[in-house]
Amino acid sequence: MLAFWKKKSPQLTREDSFAAVVVPNRQLRVERNAEGVVTLYAPFHAAVFVERIARWLGAPPRAGEAKVELDEVGSFVWDLCDGRRNVREMVACLADRYKLNRKEAEASLTAFLRSLAGRNLVAIVILKREEQASEKRRG
């Protein structure tokens, strides 16, 4: 019943999405091999329930790092996630580098960014419309 009074969140437009910037998680450890391929190491802790069972069984609490190895294209996109470029600029760079049309680059990039964001490896920062306008004037 209370759903009628629930405040609606503002709708995200396509323009808002492509004006967003992508910021890497600062807690990651990033390594690059000789070929330039990026490997990300993200710290993790076991779920509370798992830790309780482990303690009950006499095992030490489990913490460690999750390893995510990116391919050549993923490594290229990772380097674009610098917090300065917006998604639109990243699409253009990806399309130019790998000779893709804009739609292919958009689809690939947005799917990859969703995957990174879903694993908390990056944050996607949506700029306010006023900030978008000032970015357009500067660029």
Image (tube, rainbow, N blue to C red):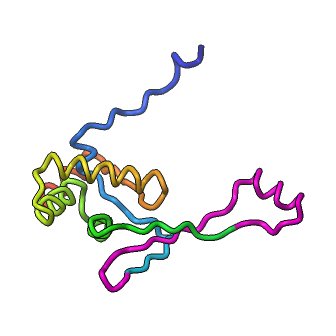
Looking at the rendered structure, the number of numbered marks drawn on it comes to: 0
Residue visible at 12% across and 50% down?
102
Q: Which residue sits at x=26%, y=44%? A: 16
Spot occupied by residue 46 in the image (x, y as percentages of width and height): 69, 59
On the rendered image, what quadrant is the C terminus found in? bottom left
Closer to us: 50 or 87: 50
Is residue 67 one of those drawn in magenta? no
Q: Is residue 115 above or below residue 2?
A: below
Q: In which image quadrant can residue 98 be found? A: bottom left
The reply, left or right, for residue 97 in relation to residue 110 is left
Residue at image position (86%, 61%) is 55
Report whether 83 appears left or right of 55.
Answer: left
Q: Residue 53: x, y in percent?
A: 83, 54
Q: Nearer the viewer, residue 50 or 48?
A: 50
- Residue 130 position, x and y percent, is 24, 48
Q: Residue furthest top?
A: 1
Left or right for 126, reference 85: right
Does residue 121 appear to the left or right of 23 in the view shown? right
Q: Nearer the viewer, residue 98 or 127?
A: 98
What is the quadrant of the N terminus in the image? top right
* Residue 34 inside the magenta-drawn segment: yes
Q: What percent of the width, then of the height, locates residue 19? A: 24, 51
Stretch of the chain drawn in magenta: 33-62
Q: Quadrant of residue 61?
A: bottom right
Query: Please, which residue is most extreme toward the bottom here?
Result: 34
Q: At x 33% / y 67%, what residue is drawn?
A: 71
